[in-house]
Image: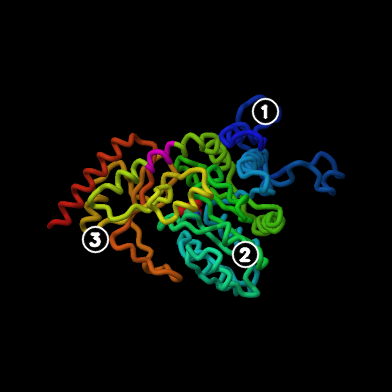
Amino acid sequence: MQSLQAETRLVVSGRDTAAQKGFVNPPVVHGSTVLYPTADDLHAHRGEFQYGRHGTPTTRALQDALMALEGPQCAGVGLVPSGLSAISTALLSVLKAGDHVLVCDNVYRPTRNFCNGLLARYGIETTYFDPLIGADIARLFRPNTRVVMVEAPGSQSFEMPDVPAVAAVAHAHGALVIDDNTWATPLFRRALEQGVDISIQAATKYIGGHSDIMFGTISANAKAWPALAETIRLLGVCAGPDDVFLALRGLRTLAVRLAHHQQSAIDMAQWLAARPEVAKVLHPALASDPGHAIWKRDFTGASGLFSIVLKPAPQAAVDALLDTVKLFGMGYSWGGFESLVIPYDCTDYRSATAWAPGGPTLRLHIGLESLSDLKADLDRGFAAFNAARSV
Ligand SMILES: Cc1ncc(COP(=O)(O)O)c(C=O)c1O
């Protein structure tokens, strides 16, 4: 399977045509009870499937397809009901009371909430670090540091950590690395081959791809998988069969969708960089971006999510833009077929680094619509922005 290109693996993996009675897709198995044919089988817990929560032919198909995508370093994939539960389950699989965790300052905000809330309550201390720290992270390690958590790039501010450099230091200190790889997906970045031990996906985003599921996946290497598998079992987390099926269906078209998102987003980012209202574009695939060299080294593509910093303007002008655009919806998830825009401000929760972009910030998701329609929509939005700014 690994000799095939990723696009092909996305299509052919996780398909057992004979077991599927000739159908291309697996059945959606809604199931709790699995019957054992004999008392001997029952006593020995023998059988490919033993209980609905522990796996079904549908979950197996998705896990096989994800393993084929992640590459040979992947020893197992856990399926959970959301991206956030993928993050929390991964952290819980490694940490125990009295441990210390290092978390990148640009992570998804609910990741911080989990660390500051539940982990703190269980006696686990978190230290946040500058996303650009690189190998200098060594000075933050303590004897009880067990995990480094990164997100590359951060899905709002787009700073790009040097994950292989951080991972080398983490491993030298006996710690594991957990990475939120949702922005690139394993198609554009094989995190497990870059020193990451557990790579999570908010599959709600690009893997689902249609804004119609909440879903999370956790891919682990051989070192991390046994504890992760046990934690999933102990917590009792599992994913609903329809969402598993939709995640697998989304995975089949991931390559074509991401190629389109990538191309449109880069075009749009360049168009925006040339606009007089825009002070800065935060997109690691642009040569002007500070994270570009790392992106070129570690990634094989870019997805459709990036941010812009507007020239200083009152909130009313930003709101006029947001209220004028029609093709860009305002909503907090991303990775679906539709374009989105959302204002954001990291000022009040960044703790290791100051967030001072110099103007209002917007995060854009470039969907699968026609670029000319999207640009015309933003043109109207900027006209409203300028009119409100000059009042
Ligand atoms: C980078 C990142 N990670 C994780 C999540 C959490 O995913 P979910 O909404 O499926 O819990 C999100 C959601 O926006 C995200 O943007």
Q: Residue furthest left?
A: 391
Mark 2: few/some/many CA within 10 Å (<14, 14-19, 20+): many
Q: Does the residue labelled 1 lie within 8 Å of ligand 1?
A: no
Say which amino acid is labelled 2. Answer: Ala
Residue 312's disc is 3
- Tell which of 361 and 215 is nearer to you: 361
Magenta stretch?
260-266
Name the residue beneath numbered marker 2. Answer: 170
Q: Residue furthest top?
A: 22
Q: Distance between the residues labelled 2 and 1?
A: 42 Å
Dot 2 or dot 3: first in sequence order is 2
Tell me the SS state at disc 1. loop
Answer above or below: position of 108 versus 136.
above
Name the residue beneath numbered marker 1. Answer: 17
Residue 304 horizontal side relative to residue 125, left or right: left
Proximity of marks 2 and 1: CB atoms separated by less than 8 Å: no
Count of numbered circles on the image: 3
